[in-house]
Amino acid sequence: EAQAASYSGTDLELKCVNTIRCLAADMVQKANSGHPGAPMGCAPMAHLLWSSSSSGGAGRKHSARNPEWWNRDRFVLSNGHACALQYVMLHLGGYEDCKMDDLKAFRQVGSTTPGHPENFCTKGVEVCTGPLGQGISNAVGMAIAAKHLGAAFNTADFPNIIDSKTYVICGDGCLQEGISGEACSLAGHLGLGDLVVLYDDNHITIDGDTDLAFTEDVKMRYEAYGWQVLTVDDVANGLDGLRAAIDEAKNTADRPTLIKVRTDIGYGSPAKQGKASSHGAPLGDAEIEAVKGKLYG
């Protein structure tokens, strides 16, 4: 009730976001391994990226019935350890490899929901991610490929045969890696306006606060690369700020966009929200119950 009172969106929107959080946490708990914190913090971002424009979402183009549709908008979860989030969204989007029984088999041998996203295991997963920096760097390549295809096949009469965008969710760890800096520098140089990166700025690493090893100004670095950088300070109490930022990114054609989104890792966990303890281990049965009590009342 307290969360609903402070939330600026609809009750349905809040219920959708909290359902993503709880389902991801349940998956990790059942597997007795995994990473619940990032999915719980990133759930608002995922909700917008996977919702239609008519329901207030980003309107990302994709098809569960035809996952390899050429002109789909690509989605890359660069912080692949948070894959419970991606599997939940594939499930809610109707993808055949992420039915409820598949979510229950998270991280089990032979399942279509492995411990990190694998594009040869799960339809709807664009690229294997896990090694930090790998996903966002692959996304730059996808954006380059889409730009090349558009230049090759679009015509004056048919200008939108290829007009796909590439969306990314990444974390601090991805931006600490040298390979991501090299790839993102190239993206800025090439002016890849169809590349939109949502940066999960949760201030937490596996060892504790990011201040332990990562104090640079990410915003200034990406602006130096030639990116547009937007900042969203709160997604826990409403999505209007993020919605506006995504719309601005979609309408910026001459450069890629980094949206720096301030989140709380493990959002909704009374004992572990904002703490490294929610990063890489199940919350525990009692804490799961407490989360649901807090989020659903």
Image: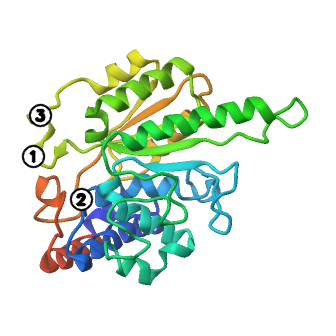
Q: Amino acid at mark 2?
A: Gly
Please tell me which residue lies in front, 213 or 252: 213
Q: Is residue 107 above or below residue 257?
A: below
Q: Disc 3 to disc 1, how far (Cα)?
A: 8 Å
Q: Does dot 2 land on a helix, a strand or a loop?
A: helix
Q: Disc 1 to disc 2, how far (Cα)?
A: 13 Å
With 159 as the anchor, is 262 left or right in this view? left
Q: Is residue 69 above or below residue 146?
A: below
Do we see residue 274 in this rendering? yes
Q: Are marks 1 and 2 in contact (CB under 8 Å)?
A: no
Question: Measuring 36% from the left and 44% from the top, which residue is drawn there?
Answer: 170
Q: Which residue does the numbered mark 2 point to in the structure image?
A: 37
Q: Which residue does the numbered mark 3 point to in the structure image?
A: 211
Give coordinates of residue 245: x percent, y percent.
Answer: 48, 37
Give coordinates of residue 211: x percent, y percent.
Answer: 11, 34
Please tell me which residue lies in front, 112 or 60: 112
Q: Is residue 158 above or below residue 15?
A: above
Do we see residue 6 in this rendering? no
Q: Dot 1, how many residues are within 10 Å of its Cα: few (below 14), some (14-19), or many (20+)?
A: some
> What is the quadrant of residue 266 in the picture?
bottom left
Earlier sequence position, callout 2 versus callout 3: 2
Q: Does dot 3 land on a helix, a strand or a loop?
A: helix
